[in-house]
């Protein structure tokens, strides 16, 4: 069952990666339009923080320390940084154990 869950998380993180990469203009990642209250970039940071906490830290025993406020306060992070941020989640192969 663990391998199946791992495969599902990897699949969904790959989808997130493709969605972020699809933005041709980086500034669009940080725009808020219409009824949506959070920018795509902030939602990606929030998802990475959530997975890093509940999957990586709690289940994988990584040393991740979450900064939830920064997930929503951060702005204009380069697209490439967002694309690499998913590597911080315990489900992508990072197995750094907390001490």
Image: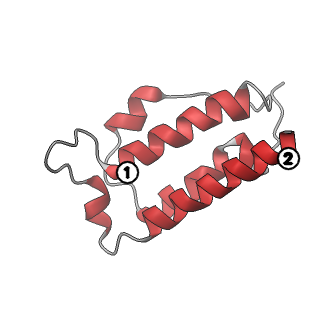
What residue sits right under mark 1 in the picture? 41
Colour mode of the rendering: secondary structure
Relative horizontal placement of residue 12, taking residue 68 as reference (left or right): right
Q: Which mark is residue 3?
A: 2
Q: Residues within 10 Å of mark 2 (few under 14, many from 20)?
A: few
Marks 2 and 1, the one that precedes in the sequence: 2
Q: In this view, which residue lies farthest toward the bottom?
A: 24
Residue 57 versus residue 15 in the image, above or below:
above
For discs 2 and 1, the disc positioned in front in the rendered view: 2
Label tally: 2
Q: Nearer the viewer, residue 7 or 28?
A: 7
Q: Is residue 42 placed above or below 27 in the rendered structure?
A: above
Residue 95: which numbered mark, if any?
none
Let me know if residue 57 appears in the view. Answer: yes
At x 84% / y 33%, what residue is drawn? 97
Q: Which quadrant is home to the C terminus?
A: top right
Q: Are marks 2 and 1 in contact (CB under 8 Å)?
A: no
Instruction: Give the x, y percent position of residue 28.
Output: 26, 62
At which x and y percent is residue 9? 68, 48
Q: Give the quadrant of the N terminus.
A: top right
**Residue 25 appears in which quarter of the rendering?**
bottom left
Mark-to-mark CA distance, 2 and 1: 29 Å
Residue at 32% over, 58% down: 29
Q: Residue 19: horizontal and vertical position, in percent? A: 45, 63
In the depicted structure, whether residue 8 falls above or below residue 58: below
Q: Secondary structure at mark 2?
A: helix
Q: Residue at x 61, y 37 (%)?
A: 51
Q: Is residue 94 visible?
A: no
Instruction: Judge left or right: residue 63 versus residue 12.
Output: right
The residue under the point 37% across, 44% down is 42
């Amino acid at each position: 069952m663990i391998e199946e869950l791992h495969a599902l998380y990897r699949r969904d993180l790959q989808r997130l990666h493709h969605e972020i990469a699809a933005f041709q203009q980086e500034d669009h990642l940080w725009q808020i339009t219409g009824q949506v209250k959070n920018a795509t970039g902030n939602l990606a940071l929030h998802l990475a923080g959530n997975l890093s906490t509940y999957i990586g830290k709690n289940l994988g025993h990584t040393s991740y320390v979450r900064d939830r406020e920064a997930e929503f306060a951060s702005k204009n992070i380069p697209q490439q940084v967002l694309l690499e941020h998913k590597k911080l989640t315990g489900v992508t192969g990072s197995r750094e154990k907390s001490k």
